[in-house]
Image (spheres, rainbow, N blue to C red):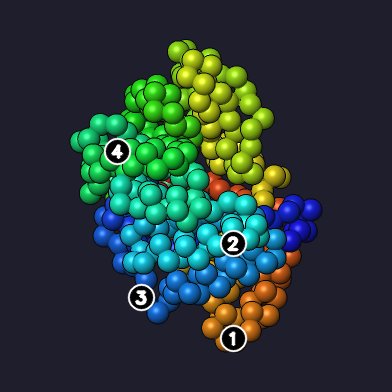
Amino acid sequence: MIDPFGRHISYLRVSVTDRCDFRCVYCMAEEMSFLPKREVLTLEELDRVCSAFVRLGVKKLRLTGGEPLVRRDIMTLFRSLGRQLESGALDELTLTTNGSQLARYAGELRDCGVRRVNVSLDTLDPAKFTEITRRGRLDQVLAGLDAAKRAGLAVKINTVALRGINEDELDTLVAWCGDQGFDLVLIEVMPMGDIGGENRLEQYLPLSLVRARLQRRWTFDDSDYRTGGPARYATVRETGRRLGFITPLTHNFCESCNRVRLTCTGTLYMCLGQEDAADLRAPMRQSESDEPLERAIREAIDRKPKGHDFVIDRRHQRPALARHMSVTGG
Ligand code: SAM
Ligand code: SF4
């Protein structure tokens, strides 16, 4: 699949559920109303739509959410998508998780062909962890990370940089990831979704500032390593690990964008920062044949926009996009 700007679309991120066992302050409101079941694609439908994308040229699949590992029977989806790895149709199957269920699933994920996981972790302080996630427990996530290591999964930690909350800890996280053998990606807060009483402008911490501060202690060798995603990477000379920066608000990464995102209701977003979307659930439920579904996918890719336009609206302090990251899957 090639979009109107000549970009090969080879990466699909799929949100398999909008539900989560955490309520991170930058992601969700304290009280969330989740989607009724009938709106959400069944595991069979998720398998069917992912397989259609793979037939059309997607080589990398990332399952996310919400929290992918809280969806019931999710391993059946991993298992069946894992078969596409065996046949060579797919190059990589991976996930982004908050880690709360990893202790239970790490070995099985490895069996399904998963080799790398992204685990979100914003702090190493147990009290702060519960404050940020509103209900998570750090020890559970650390146990999950241990299990991932033991299972032989490569781990990348995702950390959202939050002003006044974890900014004094980012330095420690670089050192800790070095010790653990994890790569680290720092993420700027994106203005997505209503998060209740929290204020995004107060959370916002520019990564240019973070980077400058970290460079007082660490030496960064700029790297041309790319995953096809928005992160720019450096290697931390002292630890030998990669450190990535995702700065959607201050930089444009759209020219190399190779990805599209599917929500758990079957809505395809061609760009994280734009509202235009295509419904894939209707063509899928309409017909047993995959032809209408494949046609809808092709038509959507033909409309992929050139870039995004995120802004934190300073006057209104409203999110530039109404949908939550847990819907599009980050
Ligand atoms: N629950 C899983 C997790 O937390 O890893 C997967 C879904 S979560 C929406 C994916 C990523 O998006 C996480 O790394 C999270 O920190 C990040 N995220 C959520 N809301 C965000 C926001 N407003 N700005 C920046 N990153 C955000
Ligand atoms: Fe859940 Fe992930 Fe959102 Fe946190 S960032 S509330 S873990 S979906």
Q: Residue at x 36, y 76 (%)?
A: 37
Pointer 1: residues within 10 angstroms few (<14), some, or many (20+)? few
Of callouts 1 and 4, which one flags the residue occurring earlier in the amino acid sequence?
A: 4
Where is residue 106 shown, x and y percent of the image?
38, 48
Above or below, 235 relative to 219: below
Where is residue 276 shown, x and y percent of the image?
61, 64
As drawn, the residue found furthest toward the bottom would be 287
Q: Which residue is mark 2?
A: 84
Q: Residue at x 51, y 29 (%)?
A: 243
Above or below, 97 relative to 322: above
Above or below, 276 relative to 259: below
Q: For marks 3 and 1, give the CA distance.
A: 23 Å
As drawn, the residue found furthest toward the left would be 127
Labelled pair 2, 4 in contact (Cβ < 8 Å)? no
Of callouts 3 and 4, which one flags the residue occurring earlier in the amino acid sequence?
A: 3
Q: Residue at x 44, y 40 (%)?
A: 152
Name the element at disc 2.
helix
Above or below, 125 relative to 311: above
Kind of residue at disc 3: Pro
Q: Which mark is residue 142?
A: 4
Q: For marks 1 and 2, give the CA distance.
A: 21 Å
Q: Which mark is residue 288?
A: 1
The answer to whether the beta carbon of the residue marked 2 is less than 8 Å from any atom of ligand 1 is: no
Left or right, 245 with reference to 55: left
Kind of residue at disc 1: Glu
Q: For marks 2 and 3, give the CA distance.
A: 30 Å
Labelled pair 3, 1 in contact (Cβ < 8 Å)? no
